[in-house]
Image (cartoon, helix red, strand yellow):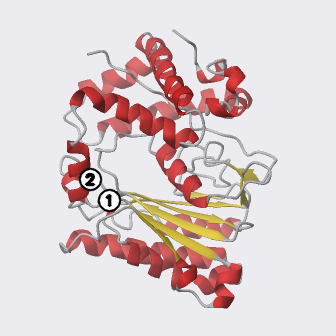
Amino acid sequence: MRKIVVLLLAFYTVPIFTQYTSQTYPDPRNDPFSCRMGFPSGVCDPSSVLSDEERTRLAQRLVGVTSSIRNSAPSCSQRPDANLQLVVAVLDKIGAFAGAQVDVEKFANNLKRRYQNYQDIGICDTFVLIVNSRQDRQVFTVAGRDAKISKETLKRAFESNIGHFKSNKFALGLEGMVEMITAAYSNAHIVQVPTPVEGFVQENLESSIPAASQQSFRASAVLTKTQESFEELVGQVPDEDRAWVDIMSIAVARCGESGDLMKSIRSVVEEAMAISVKLISDSRYNGIEEEVETNKDILGIRDSAWKKAAIEWITPLFQRYKEAIRAGGAQVCPALNPHKILTSPNLLLRTL
């Protein structure tokens, strides 16, 4: 079976504007400088909502807090190194079309998918993303299925710190949420507890927050489906349909379902084919795969190989062509620019 490889460039520079979409917001693990950090971390604040000291202190709280705890989820059984991945995304304002309502839920879910390189839904998912948008006065948390963090925990984490957000002490609010979320993760995997209520849940806290709080700040929380319901859902997809389901998931994550879905799906397929052809003959990518294959018995070798590549050539390459990469980022969703589908050389796209 022909293998399709999709390479998505998730590097962006610090733009002049204070609004970001899920496609233009930088990744603190790969592009710390755009996130106002001096080193790769789990904190991104391109708009400088927090001070330098606050960002550093928050990043330190995310380092190795659950590293000694092995994840107990069935999907993570083949990954003994699986651990809580927690990223905090702070921004001034979420970008939206003129007159359109800001959708923090869509922003957070799409950003999480992008940060995870649009991974297959069956892969171990311990990723938790907290989004704090200052001007939109919103906080949204999305938790991966295998983190086993309930909606009640996410709700309580916000409610316990709402006073900090109301008084614009965002760093204190985020630190408090991080502390409660990491504690919940530790408890869930040290001691086996019942899984949260089944369902894909969006919790709007306006109904349980006092009136004064409702007017100044809104919080939402998302919890993915439980392990049992997820496995049942995946089991309904035959092997011959799995690739197309994954492709459609990527298309929906990029552009949503309201636009031209067929155009988005076609774009994902043609992009994958075009990039796959290029990668087959690319010595740098082949070098990564060869290193992984040669050292396949070493735990975490794939992550190590990619980190090595980031230092040796990915980051320098990005620095060299960052303006072109940033310009190409706007073309990710073809529905937004129907006359320029697959024409951006910066994203290595072409129609086969």
Contact flag, marks 1 and 2 (Cβ < 8 Å)? yes
Give how far apart the Cα atoms at labels 1 and 2 are. Answer: 6 Å
Residue 346, by quadrant, is top right
Q: Residue at x 59, y 53 (%)?
A: 107
Q: Residue at x 70, y 82 (%)?
A: 215
Residue 171: % across, % down:
62, 74
Residue 38: % across, % down:
63, 53
Q: Is residue 307 visible?
A: no
Q: Secondary structure beneath disc 2?
A: helix
The residue beneath circle 1 is 225
Q: Residue at x 62, y 46 (%)?
A: 26
Point out which mark residue 230 bears: 2
Question: Callout 1: 10 Å neighbours few (<14), some, many (20+)?
Answer: many
Query: Looking at the picture, does residue 151 appear above or below residue 239?
Result: below
Residue 180, by quadrant, is bottom left
Residue 144: % across, % down:
38, 57
Question: Callout 2: 10 Å neighbours few (<14), some, many (20+)?
Answer: some
Three-letter amino acid code at the position of disc 1: Lys
Sequence-earlier tag: 1 or 2: 1
**Depth check: 84 or 103 in front?**
103
Q: Residue at x 29, y 29 (%)?
A: 241
Point out which mark residue 179 bears: none
Q: Is residue 173 visible?
A: yes
**Depth check: 89 or 69 in front?**
89
Three-letter amino acid code at the position of disc 2: Phe
